[in-house]
Amino acid sequence: DSGVTQTPKHLITATGQRVTLRCSPRSGDLSVYWYQQSLDQGLQFLIQYYNGEERAKGNILERFSAQQFPDLHSELNLSSLELGDSALYFCASSSKSRTDTQYFGPGTRLTVL
Amino acid sequence: AQSVTQLDSQVPVFEEAPVELRCNYSSSVSVYLFWYVQYPNQGLQLLLKYLSGSTLVKGINGFEAEFNKSQTSFHLRKPSVHISDTAEYFCAVISIFGNEKLTFGTGTRLTIIP
């Protein structure tokens, strides 16, 4: 158990819909990262938050957005869903610096029908 | 920008045999290097990481990796594998400054043959 929790574990929805994925980092970790894992793209970095502020953006679509709340939990919002958004979405957290290990949650499997 | 290449998408190995999973990287700046393991239906777990110092790094579950700067490689090894090592293994890098994202390779599926 990494200490990072993600809900829900599975999500099945239809094209055009909007969903919210939730992540609670390990106690004391200030950084939260979101990654997408799909068969065709592999593991791709989406976005990072540090202590409530956006710190880095990766290959995140404009239809996707995220935020980190004062209690440090984070949410990833995916809207106008397309079939190609079906993937495993991971949240990871780390303490402060890039040398600290990123601990991954169990992931949310999103299926868009 | 960085990139990571894992040349072998699948590696079958007999139980108790040694294994080496290859990883090469490309980067215009220095990087830190990581190996993660993903067991079926689970998240990623850190096996080991190289930050600085000795180029031979020991990790969990009997794995080790050697950083070779001239060959830009970070190969993962285990002298004797077990059925429980069946999993997907990912090599990843982070640049020493700038964006803190992990850049992953495409993964190597290790299958242990009894």
Image (cartoon, helix red, strand yellow):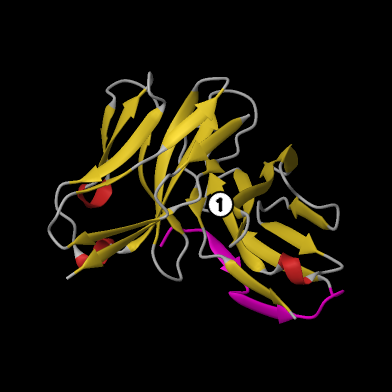
- Res B42 → quadrant: bottom left
Q: Is residue A52 visible?
A: yes
Q: Front-most of B41 and A104?
A: B41
Q: For this view, does A47 lie left or right of residue B37?
A: right
Residue at mark 1 = A92
Q: Quadrant of the C terminus of chain B?
A: bottom left
Q: For this view, does B36 lie left or right of residue A35?
A: left
In this rendering, the answer to whether A108 lies above or below B12 is below
Q: For this view, does A38 lie left or right of residue A70?
A: left
At a point 67% along the width and 64% down the height, the residue shown is A22
At a point 38% along the width and 30% down the height, the residue shown is B73
Q: Position of residue A32 (x, y in %)?
A: 62, 48
Q: Position of residue A87 (x, y in %)?
A: 64, 66
Q: Is residue A96 visible?
A: no
The verdict on residue A9 being magenta is yes
At a point 20% along the width and 48% down the height, the residue shown is B62
- Res B9 → quadrant: bottom left
Q: Which residues are magenta?
A: A1-17
Label 1: few (<14), some (14–19) or many (≥20) C-alpha neighbours in 10 Å: many
Q: Position of residue B17 (x, y in %)?
A: 14, 55
The verdict on residue A5 being magenta is yes
Q: Quadrant of the N terminus of chain B?
A: top right
In this rendering, the answer to whether B103 lies above or below A86 is above
In this rendering, the answer to whether B32 lies above or below A69 is above
Given the image, on which type of amino acid does mark 1 rest? Ala
